[in-house]
Amino acid sequence: MTTLSLIQPTGRLTLGNLLGALRPMVERQADAFYGIADLHALTVRHSPAALRARTEEIAALMLAVGLDRSTLFLQSRVPAHAQLAYLLECTAYTGELNRMIQFKEKGRGNDATRTSLYTYPVLMAADILLYRAEQVPVGDDQRQHVELTRDLALRFNATYGPVFTVPEMVAPAAGARVMSLSDPSVKMGKSNADETGTVYLLDPPDVVRRKVARAVTDSDVGADAVRHDRAAKPGVTNLLEILAACGGSPAGITTYGALKAAVTDAVVGLLDPLQKAYADLADDAAHVRSVFAAGEHRCREVTGPVLAAAGSAMGLA
Ligand code: TYM
């Protein structure tokens, strides 16, 4: 089953990225293409030096989490992504892009919004369709983008002939939507202003402990205070979900203190091997670069014929 997913180098990777995407990716490595979406990172104000540094860090982290049996690549190094994005822009409707939540939240109504933020989901559709991916492991926040990708694939195939595979999103049972520890109404994100609510993959154990200890719960201390209830107890539910996603069990936990201790242990236990592997790889940048160079070579081979088929179906000579 061909599997594909990308991660944007717009900040340091978080526990949300790990539970929502990277771990499901590690479980699916046969015929898998996993990339760093550096072109997508240009859609908002950015610093070129920071982009380069984040890209290097994420490349090493992808190997450190165990993606060593997949084809790894940098999106900008595979020219067919930008090329297919243009062809798909010629099939996508402005009505569809106007409905995209990310654009509504991050850019609509601001004259200085980059045009590429508006067309962002079309580039993402190109990422997926170029590889004829069947499965796309992503967190819940990417659902609308994968649905648009499906719509564009179906429309293209119906209009110009059967070029693309219609992909399915795959989300983990627990961890598809990890929320901020300091404000469980917002997603734990790479670029959240309040960093105390975000656990970064390279946070040392004492930092994880402090962030979890300060996590927002609520003032209910009844006998069933520790329970799953997203509406009434979003903070506690988030901690329970993180615990489950890290392989921990809530059995016997009745207090917030005990819940936070269990979450800390589970998260630190999950991050420890990854941080050790990262430390080794950080000393061997040449190895990371060579893995990505080999991946990019393979991606060019795989994507060339699909781009050509799409152009030809549309009538390009
Ligand atoms: P990005 O870089 O924001 O996030 C990378 C992956 O992590 C998941 N994720 C989360 N999952 C659970 N809880 C969270 N708090 C959380 N935060 C992030 C995301 O859902 C994603 O799977 N548009 C994409 C990048 C992209 C892409 C693609 C993905 C570009 N082209 C093609 C799949 C296929 C993005 O911004 O992800």
Image (tube, grey):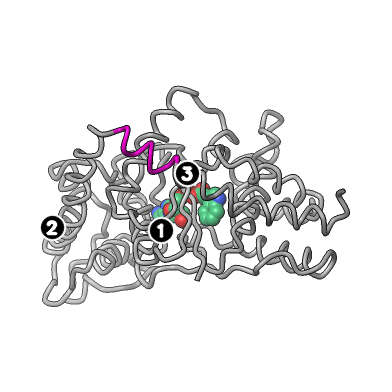
What is the spatial separation of the Cα atoms under label 2 and label 3, in whole angstroms?
A: 30 Å
| Image location (x, y in percent) of residue 156 | 78, 63
| Residue bounds of the magenta highlight | 285-293
- Decide which of tag 1 and tag 2 comes sooner along the chain: 1
The residue wearing badge 3 is 36
- Residue 278 lies in the magenta-colored region: no
At a point 46% along the width and 53% down the height, the residue shown is 34
Q: Which circle, 1 or 2, is nearer the viewer?
A: 1
Residue 167 locus on image (x, y percent): 60, 68
Mark 1, residue position:
21
Can residue 175 be seen by looking at this rendering?
yes
Give the distance between the C-alpha atoms of the residues marked 1 and 2, in whole angstroms. 21 Å
| Chief SS of the magenta region | helix
Please identify the quarter of the rendering in which residue 192 is found: top left
Marker disc for residue 265: 2
- What amino acid is found at the position of numbered circle 2 in the picture? Asp
